Amino acid sequence: MSYNSNIDSIELLRKAEKSLMYVTPRPSIVFIEGKGSYLWDSEGNKYLDMIAGWAVCCLGHSPDTMVDALARQAKQLINPSPSFYNQPAIEFADLLTKISCMDKVFFINSGAEANEGAIKLARKYGQKFKNGAYEIITTWNSFHGRTLATMAASGKKQWENLYKPQPKGFTKVEYNDTEALRQSISKDTCAVMLELIQGEGGVIVADKNYVKQVRQLCDENNILLIIDEVQTGLGRLGDMFAYEDYEIEPDILTLAKGIGGGFPLAALLAKDKVCCFEAGDQGGTYSMTPLGAAVGIAVVQEIIDLDLCNHVKKISEYFTKQLSDLILRHKVVKEVRGKGLLLAIGLHEEIANEIKDECMNNHLIINAPNTKTLRFMPALNISTVEVDEAMSILNQILNNFTGKS
Ligand SMILES: *Cc1c(COP(=O)(O)O)cnc(C)c1O
């Protein structure tokens, strides 16, 4: 990879500290290039990336198909405004409705916006068809985004008192608990909002029976089921959409992360009967840009053409087996969780952050969603050789940690 020795890393990091608003601690590294499952920093160091831009770069970093689509569409038309139709947005909506059980699509740019739109659509449906029902039932430990409403919808205890007052209208119940959900339904309930795997929550998988029972409860009570597939959608779990494996159909579906392959793009999808927005109810200056849609088409078409769902199923089996072997080898490893290429290992001790940092020092990028979990969400086209490389680094580091404790 081209290493640009003209970059003054120290100076860049000084500027970063001076000018970027602080929101989270970051390592003293500046990434300048990416290809496939690898990233390069400004010092020329190469890293194996097992988080893929936070489960977004599903085709790896800077894949040719995205670069071509971006260049082609940028030359042709970037944004005629959301007031007018454009060809890529029409074609992309058509493609998404063909590969999913959904009828209509609204495009925006982030998962939080997609979920915010889902909340609005469900409330509008409640106003129009259910005597003003507005309450949305969500689950503890869930993550639905960082707008005020999606933070209120999320089940993070530490967010309950942040940015008070919180938008009202969200009831939280335990995940995988049908009875708790049944008991929290009232005449004011318009929707249930659910992740099929709680990704940010630490890769907690929904039980199949639970999801089927939730679907049934929603049907019996005229309640909409919103499935948040921002993280699980577009092949991440080995099916194009996670709801397929659960053998249910949502009324509203939200997609982001993988849909843009790293480019900011998201979609709110719904069944016809739910689509009740009236003129002016929903919008956004950057909704349905041809540039975003052209990238989305390229990404989704590549997932289909390369049969990446099948690849994910196979490589997941390989990866899961290797992760399971860690349980026997290292006392600190408790279990393997997840599906497809959204995998995690649960630890007995609260040392996930230390292990993650040590991996980074050894040029392996992984994530610690909490102190007892290590998460892996690599590009969908990752190879067995790359999985082996990651496992070898991780094994070495776990050896050192076990040696210390
Ligand atoms: C990442 C995520 C979101 C938020 O998406 P942004 O693009 O960061 O706004 C919402 N829901 C789930 C399940 C996610 O994983």
Image (cartoon, rainbow, N blue to C red):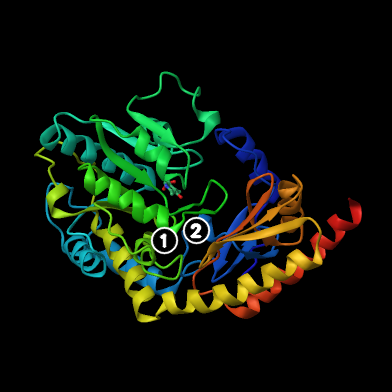
Q: CA distance from mark 1 to mark 2?
A: 6 Å
The answer to whether residue 9 is above or below residue 64 is above
Is residue 243 visible in the rendered structure shown here?
Answer: yes
Q: Secondary structure at mark 2?
A: helix
Say whether marks 1 and 2 touch (CB < 8 Å). yes
Nearest the camera: 80 or 179? 179
Q: Earlier in the sequence, mark 1 or mark 2?
A: 2
The answer to whether residue 121 is above or below residue 389 is above
Q: Percent position (x, y) of residue 255?
A: 34, 55
Is residue 265 visible in the rendered structure shown here?
Answer: no
**Residue at the image position 55 percent from the left and 76 percent from the top:** 315
Q: Secondary structure at mark 1?
A: helix
**Residue at the image position 67 percent from the left and 59 percent from the top:** 335
Q: Which residue is mark 1?
A: 258
Q: Which corner quadrant of the image does residue 1 belong to? A: bottom right
Q: How many marks?
A: 2
Q: Amino acid at mark 2?
A: Ala
Mark 1 CB near ligand 1 (8 Å cut) = no
**How many C-alpha atoms fall within 10 Å of the one at disc 1: few (<14), some, or many (≥20)?**
many
Q: Percent position (x, y) of residue 394?
A: 74, 64
Q: Which mark is residue 332?
A: none
Mark 2 CB near ligand 1 (8 Å cut) = yes
Q: Which mark is residue 55?
A: 2
Q: Amino acid at mark 1?
A: Gly
Left or right position of 190 against 360: left
Q: Percent position (x, y) of residue 17?
A: 63, 36
